Amino acid sequence: MKLNSHNWKLACLPFGVVALVISLVAWASSSPINISSKAPLMAEDNSFSQTVKQVDRFFEKQWSENKITPAQISNDQLLLRRLSLALHGTIPSLEEIREFDSMQGEDRLERWTQKLLADRRFADYFSERLARAYVGVSGGQFIIFRRDRFKAWLSEQIQANTPYDQLARDLIAGEGLWTGDPETNFITAASADGNLDRNKLTGNTVRAFLGQRIDCAQCHDHPFDHWKQSDFEGLTAYYGQVEIQVFGVRQNEELKYEVEDRDTLEKRTVSPQVPFLTECLPEEGTLREKLAAWVTHPKNRRFERASANRIWGLLFGVPYIAPVDDLPAPTDLSQSEPDLLDLLGDDFRKNGYDIKRMIQIIVASKQFRLSSTSENIEPEQIERDTEAWALFPLVRLRPEQVIGSMLQSSSLKTIDQNSNLFMRGRRFFSELDFLNEYGDLGSEELNDFPGTIPQALLRMNGKFAKENGSASPLNSVGRIAQLNISDEKRIETCFLVCLTRLPTELESEHFLKQYQAEPDQRAKITEDLFWSLYNSPEFSWNH
Amino acid sequence: MIDTTFLSSKINRRDLCKVALGGTLSFMLPGFDLKAAQKRGPERKKSVIILWMGGGPSQLETWDPHPGTKIGGPGKAMKTALPGLQISDMYPLLAEQLESMSVIRSMVSKEGDHERGTKYFKTGYRPEPTTVYPALGAIITHQAPNSDLEIPQHISMGNTQQPARGGYLGGHLDAFRINDPGKNIGNMRASVKSPRQNRRLDNLSVVSQTFQKGRVNQAQKTLHQSTIDRALTMMSSEQLNALEIDKETESVRKAYGDSPFGRGCLVARRLVEQGVHSIEVNLNGWDSHTNNFNGHITQSKLLDPAFSSLLKDLKSRDLLDSTIVLCIGEFGRTPKINGLDGRDHWPSGFSCIVGGGGLKSNVIIGETDPTGKEKKPKEPVEIQDLYATILQKLNIDYTKELISPIGRPLKLSEGTPIQKLI
């Protein structure tokens, strides 16, 4: 039978449509952000370097008083790794390492930090961290609580660098529907069994924005601090008029806040009252607007100190004062010297509560650049140095950092919003699965936690580790094994991809021997090399 | 606590291989753990198996039927081997095995939401933001660890959103999870065989040495290597056999049912024999807001064979006296049948089965109103009371206080033991 060319074209039509749809979807899903913008030039800012100096001096004074010698300054590659882990939750890709290596100038780390902060990955990563601090990780009541929307909203605010006090006020006083005005999910997250738990709202607000755990004052006076049960009730009364209706979160002026007395079981009305700094309360506004203004008032130093402690915690993996949300009351600065949180907080307030600026200050300070190695071998001495921040702390990577790093190291190119759909989808689903098995830390993520045997088993034998660590033309293991380069270079590339450093002579020799002994086993040797890097302490500890 | 002296001592991989080899040969000798595992009666250390009914089963279609009433639905009741107890006729196999167990028909909770209710009923503490409470299994493992075990001490089987956690006691007390018990022991087997596995471990020690330079103390404190070593011990342990069920005869496997829950119950029995003290087997699918009656028939076909076989086996192996079995969910379901033939969440007055391990048997506690009008059951029991009872039977002082990370002293259980069960 003669092949009809018309039929042939018809037969191809579906394929054409599929191809068109695929390219359209790929185009639509690609990020509007420019591909890997160049690292910007630094603008001179006196107050910026002033604060950095103050922070450095603060620690130097402590060290000299306690006769402590700080550790050496780390090399740039290690700092690159710390920065990516802190700001993007992954290790740098080979592509990024190469780009950084090609940069010149004394200030290349500062410029690199700016680049990372401008990257959408920063906003996405930090929005999850902040969401945990505000509403935890639980799903809540699905119909009225949309965590996904909430996180997306936070990410937008971070990307736009909304002043942090503004962001806090939007959360506390926001009105509207949880879908259209996602900030209101801060309120609806406290809903359980169809009732709004106002005590939980107060607890969340004070922990997230003032860095104090007053939840126990819900039932009794705080055992160690000066918080009274009446303080808690007075604060909660500011949430007394918020209501969740069909039209969303609304203020209802008719409502009175009542509590049941634990002893007499009688109901009594509580009027809104703040425990201190009454003068910071505005005259005007709804109850929640008043509370929001009070929490973020420039005189309320708890707000800036709590923010500084949290940001410090996210950069180092451990907060300056632990736990991250239970800080001592601020001291009187006319009587005593400002501490680190006062210094950072002061700069934060004077510069429009700019999160990105605070991050840059901390990164530019000496603390962030200290090595985690020490010539001391006395355990007590090392303990002392670590406590004095004279040594970069060894901190276990959080689960999402482990999975982010494993995924990134399985690719030579940067995995970000410009990656293809497949890669991004893989990241999304593997992260969920892995977190589920590795154990998610929820809102407790800045607390110290021990590693577990199931985690070790998951890294060694898990499905994800197996898939990522088996050579294929699509992943870095397979590609590095295939590359037509010397075995020395091959080993170097593996180390850069996984550990962001070159191998030592000893390491190089060890692996070189393996490649030379069995030249036809390149793929398997590379797989085994990758496996050992994935499971090394260096991979899963920030150092 | 974990034995840190063991962790910090310098065991290298070769030593471990020796230990592992010794372990493989030790079956020839009646080792200590073997002796302990063979003990029966009151001398044997007690285990707890929790059969967790996720979603909240209906008390009316399980252990507290009210046939012929307005709230009773179409179900019927049947007599059981426990004198005076009638349960739903969907459980004919279990009915024969209930002698020496007890039933509580008056469990009450203050949480009507799945997540909060599950947290409350798995820990004995109502959830709150500042403290993550440990599950009962974690408390038991913390207070009465079994140092002879090379496999995890606290195991949760079957798929669940909320497995038993270690809470403030630490992540190392989280239940070890096995999603598909009896089929897949998950990550317990190395992905490559020796000599490649050996090459991998050799590589690892070379790379780890570099990291230790300048960080000898810090690196040791991370416990990274010792955790890996313990994982390797586990991977080569003979005790892993407890997780495999192909050694059981086909008729035994069939009796439990070829479902994740059935296999989980069979593995649970094997784990008890091995000396594991805290085991959880999850069965989801009880959240019957619609089509309650058909849903409960489906569920009963999974629960009845597995639960009854477990009790039967424990009895015939003389293990029930040292094993507490508890079958419970986060709440029950409304007496009222809704418009979609379903029942909704009901945290006041629902049932559980508990027994074994020296608890008093054949006791029926509480009663619910057959008209469904009276919300409160007779003799209400709170979960913390049940856990205090269980801990006491395990010779663990439930009033003992531990200090939470924020410095708050917390009792192991805030309940009081249920006298009728002791």
Image (cartoon, coloured by chain):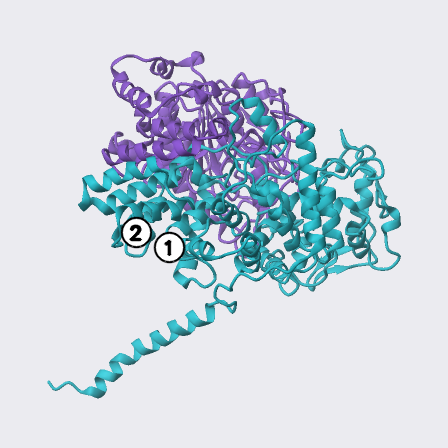
Residue A166, percent from left and from top: 73, 58
Chain B: drawing colour = purple
Residue A170, percent from left and from top: 72, 58
B193 horizontally vs A443: left or right: left
As shown in the figure, which amino acid type bears the numbered disc 1? Leu
As shown in the figure, which amino acid type bears the numbered disc 2? Ile
**Residues at badges 2 and 1 in contact (C-beta under 8 Å)?**
yes
Q: Which chain is indicated by disc 2?
A: A
Q: Which mark is residue A480?
A: 2
The foreground one among B382 and A128 is A128
The foreground one among B226 and A362 is A362
The number of numbered badges drawn on the structure is: 2
| Chain letter for the part of the structure drawn in cyan | A
Farthest-out residue, left: A1
- Identify the residue at horizontal 37%, vertical 46% (top origin): A464
Image quadrant where residue A65 sits: top right
Camera sees residue A263: yes
Q: Earlier in the sequence, mark 2 or mark 1?
A: 1
Secondary structure beneath dot 1 equals loop
Relative height, residue A365 to residue A225 (above, below) = below
B340 horizontally vs A326: left or right: left
Q: Which residue is mark 1?
A: A412
The foreground one among A280 and A311 is A311
Q: Which chain is indicated by disc 1?
A: A
Residue A380, percent from left and from top: 57, 22
Q: Which mark is residue A134?
A: none
Label 2, residues with CA under 10 Å away: few <14, some 14-19, many ≥20: many
Q: Quadrant of the N terminus of chain A?
A: bottom left
